[in-house]
Image (cartoon, grey):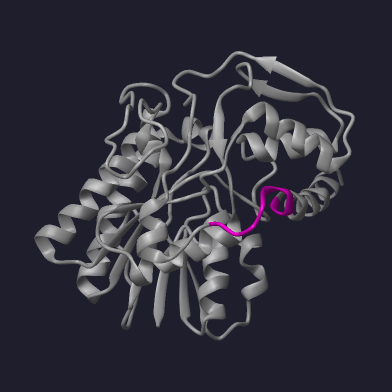
Amino acid sequence: MRIAITGACGFLGSHLCDYFLGKGAKVIAVDNLITGSTRNIEHLAGNRNFQFLHHDVTNYIFIEGKIDAILHFASPASPRDYLELPIQTLKVGSLGTHKALGLAKEKGARFLLASTSEVYGDPLVHPQREEYWGNVNPVGPRGVYDEAKRFAEAMTMAYHRFHGVDTRIVRIFNTYGPRMRIRDGRALPNFFVQALRNEPITIYGDGSQTRSFVYIEDEVEGIARALENGDNDPINIGNPQEITILQLAREIIEVTGSSSEIVLKDLPEDDPKVRQPDISKAKRLLKWEPKISRADGLARTCEYFKKMVVEDEF
């Protein structure tokens, strides 16, 4: 197979490059490096099956030769990113998705959209099933990301229905592991960096809000199975084991051996109170569910952040 991955220098995209190269595929990595880093793919330099294309996918995408599949992962993905880059976030979700789908149509390629649990907003249904339409504030500060992804889903389904493009939509829940940025702005990398530096761990709100964390290795396997065996409708890929943010902070303090104390601050506007995927469809259709425990995943991630924090200090 010959696969194009947009956003390939990001956390998820770079791991997908590794996965498909490991399966013998040829991979074209596309990224404009607005939030991604070539550091995430530097180990692939010299691999004859790997090609990097520095390109903004909101512009026309030209790739010579056949392409069997396109995985569209280009987008700022953390609240810090899309609050600092609101226009770029909206453009990559709309124009970028349009251009990537146009390439899929031209090449007769299968198309997979990286959507997000954020399409559910601050959900009134718990856990979240794919049939739930969500509770999103379109004009709030998080709306640039939420609505970009919701538009991307609508565009993907339109290309499937009108042009007959074979499409997939994966709704990705909180994912963690090596290659996360230390200034990502999300809870888990923030907690690791603060704990390893023995700084106060900052929790926004009272810590009772919940998230569901899946380790990167499990997430990538679920995405790959969705590409191969999924249907055209959205599918949740995440971990149904729900945890409060306060409990997560305590677990990270324990795994790092930190002396950090926990400090509470005001909750940001429209921050979801709960997040838990119903993965019944993934279990049934893909024969997939997470296998790596949170204890194991946090231990692996801790080793990565130890190295990153040391490098950041020099």
Residue 20 % position (x, y): 50, 75
Q: Is residue 18 left or right of residue 189?
A: left
Quadrant of the rendered structure where residue 48 is?
Answer: bottom right
Furthest-top residue in view?
A: 266
Quadrant of the rendered structure where residue 151 is?
Answer: top left
Above or below for 261 versus 52 = above
Q: Is residue 176 left or right of residue 225?
A: right
* Residue 42 falls inside the magenta stretch: no
Q: Residue at x 32, y 27 (%)?
A: 135
Q: Is residue 4 among the parts visible in the rendering?
A: yes
Q: Residue at x 52, y 81 (%)?
A: 23
Q: Is residue 62 left or right of residue 75?
A: left
Residue 73 % position (x, y): 43, 56
Furthest-left residue in view?
A: 162
Q: Nearer the viewer, residue 267 or 93?
A: 267
Above or below for 217 versus 4 = above
Counting the numbered discs, the total is 0
Q: Is residue 54 among the parts visible in the rendering?
A: no
Q: Which residues are magenta?
A: 290-297
Residue 39 % position (x, y): 66, 61
The N terminus lies in quadrant:
bottom left
Residue 121 % position (x, y): 38, 30
